[in-house]
Amino acid sequence: MGKRRGYDEREGNPMRITFVMDGPIWRPYGAPKVIYQYANRLASRGHQIAVVHPTRIRNLLPPSSVAGWLKDRAREARNLAVAWGLLGHRRVRWFTIDPRVRMLFVPDLRASYVPDGDVVIASQESAAEEAAQYPDQKGCKFHMVQTYPGWGGSVERTNQTWRMPLHKILVAYWLFELGLSLGCDASEMTVVPNGVDLDQYRLINPIASRPKRVALLYSLREQKGSADGIAALEFAKKAHPSLQAVFFGTNHRRPSVPSWVEFRFDPPQEEIVQEIYNGSSILLFPSWREGFPLIPSEAMACGCAVVSTDCPGVQEFAQHEVNALLSPPRDIEALTKNLLRLLDDDALRIRLAQAGVETIKQFTWERSTDLLEALLKSKVQGKNLADAEAVSRR
């Protein structure tokens, strides 16, 4: 069997695209969800897709102190334990993966474990650090940047990965401006906004007739602002004793969650769509920083009026008084006032929710995949042309 040639659009060959994750993904969250969306959609377009998951993570945190080293080892041990379960099942259970996508679980991200191809796309810092060292046969190198700083380490480490020779795929325009401030070349950055699966996240229950029920993503990550959201809800409950709230997420209920709040641990996506988003009139989103958050955009598509912080990622699709009410991160008083405004003014809630549904119609995964596919094709074609010219000069 002959060696497969690289991508050539004139011959109709599909691209060989490898996504490199930063670890085993055992629970749902935004960054891997975006990768899996693209993997599925690119596979449906005929491209050959592999998603590589390391089961052992090296240098997750720089060992600059004993405490940091111990934290690094503890996190690695946890990931190894989880990876053992993943290896037994060879699949991600919380997201439906197209059977045409090769899901690879490998010891680490050394080049020998990564398929040769036309494109390799790294997620997060640890994956980008490895991908920057890959030989040319792994493909044109990209880093999909979904937040700043990254989850894996310090601001300094994040900045270092931004300066590596990988073309940056940015999920939001504010990240492009940030890249310029870090000294990155504009030609080496491309914005591809996140999308929303409008077939899944959809309006089921009429907006106008919804009860005074507030949904909130509950997280133990401090920057997600769950404590701020709880404080705002407690104030609102005093003004509206009949107020209901439902929390959901991948962390178990903690004592800090008020007893009157309904709690859904790790619910399936269709339950989130039908019972949480469509069963609530408001989504409260108190996060301190985001790249391009999926939760408020998906809730908008389902008819929730959004009360959120105005961190840059939210501003990619939300405008104060137009389709949401926004307030500065960590400002509990302002967050509470906006929540009370919607609880007191049903007409305002309905207007903002309806505007949100219309806004999110612009953010489809089909459009995002078009943009990503065009970017990858242009880079691969450029590399092939450069390689051909180099051969002709020999």
Image (tube, grey):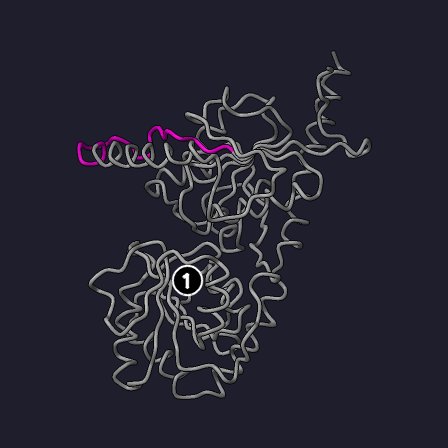
Judge by depth and name the residue closer to the eye, 156 or 65.
65
Screen quadrant of the C terminus: top right
* Residue identified by numbered label 1: 311
Judge by depth and name the residue closer to the eye, 155 or 129.
129
Q: Is residue 162 left or right of residue 301?
A: left
Residue closest to the far left: 66
Please name the residue shown 43% across and 36% down the image: 22
- x then y, percent, for residue 357: 57, 72
- x then y, percent, for residue 307: 41, 73
Please name the residue shown 68% across and 28% down the image: 383
Image quarter of residue 255: bottom left
The stretch of residues the image draws in magenta is 52-69
Image quarter of residue 268: bottom left
Which secondary structure is most common in the magenta stretch?
A: loop
Q: Mark 1: few, some, or many residues within 10 Å (few <14, many ≥20)? A: some
Residue closest to the far front: 88
Amino acid type shown at disc 1: Cys
Provide the secondary structure element on which disc 1 rests.
loop
Is residue 151 depicted above or below 384 in this figure? Answer: below
Q: Is residue 72 magenta?
A: no
Is residue 271 depicted above or below 13 in this figure? Answer: below
Is residue 282 depicted above or below 289 in this figure? Answer: below
Is residue 115 depicted above or below 250 in this figure? Answer: above
Please name the residue shown 61% across and 28% down the image: 139
Residue closest to the far right: 10
- x then y, percent, for residue 5: 73, 22
Screen quadrant of the N terminus: top right
Please name the residue shown 35% across and 43% down the image: 155
Judge by depth and name the residue closer to the eye, 59 or 312.
59
- x then y, percent, for residue 382: 70, 32
